[in-house]
Amino acid sequence: MRLAGRRILVTGAARGLGLAMARRFVAEGARVLMADVLPEGADRAAELGDSAAFITCDVSSREQIAAAIDTIIARWGGIDCLVNNAGIAPRGDILTETPEQFGQVLAINLTAAFHAIQLAAPHMIAAGKGVVINMSSVNAVLTIPGLLAYNVAKGGLDQLTRNAAVALAPHGVRVVGIAPGTILTELARTAVLADDAARAMILSRTPLGRAGEPEEIAAIAAFLASDDASYITGETIVADGGRMALNYTMPPT
């Protein structure tokens, strides 16, 4: 119960990594406000009992992010941890990406995190402690040409993590990131695991020979949100089955 009594806001929590993290946080004693545009998030929150609640939130709107932060403070008296997880990954390269789609991806995957940190930080500063977890990706450093906007947004998110960590460190607030490789979520299945050939390509450059499970990322998030990670800030932990360490491909088994 490392997170007993902690009050955590998770964006993009209706499914995938956000849902896995919400479940892990509750299992470790936290109270979680699950924010998402998908209405099924309400049912997922209900399944977690009184320790979870749901709010409809489009993170491309600063006003809706502010409403979510106001809600967790009104409901449980504060915010101890913010998880910027909401994201989209539509396909498009430098020749085909439309300005509208590029702007939407950056608004949801990057600018939303800026808004959320800026709005939540004063409450954490007043408490003298707090944790922000930004969900990055190996594609902040590596690149998939057909996911231009997603790659750019995640690269910017890593820099936001470092910058905010340094700025907020004197106030007792830690800012960290998690950069997953290929994890078996709905987003990964549509974006990078669409067929057998794509799956084989991913596994050929993953030394552990498999995709990750959402629960494995949730375990890292629970660690980072806890006092066990009290001396970690400004860092993004990579959980990719060894992909970033590999400079050649491996035949999938």
Image (tube, rainbow, N blue to C red):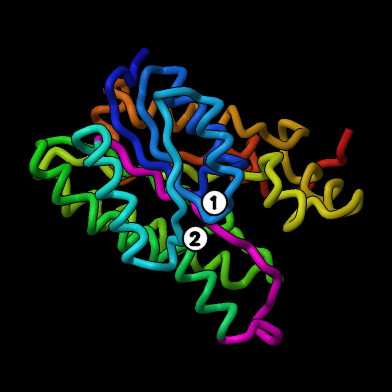
What residue lies at 51% left-to-right and 41% top-to-bottom?
Answer: 238
What residue lies at 41% left-to-right and 24% top-to-bottom?
Answer: 50
What residue lies at 58% left-to-right and 57% top-to-bottom?
Answer: 139
* Disc 1 target residue: 137
The picture quadrant where one finds residue 9 is top left
Picture coordinates of residue 217 (x, y %)? 54, 33
- Going by the numbered disc 2, the residue's amino acid type is Lys
Distance from label 1 to label 2 (Cα)? 6 Å
* Disc 2 target residue: 154
Q: Is residue 47 left or right of residue 243?
A: left
SS at badge 2: helix
The magenta stretch spans residue 90: yes
Q: Are marks 1 and 2 in contact (CB under 8 Å)?
A: yes
From this viewpoint, is residue 159 visible? no
What residue lies at 31% left-to-right and 17% top-to-bottom?
Answer: 4
Picture coordinates of residue 74 (x, y %)? 22, 41
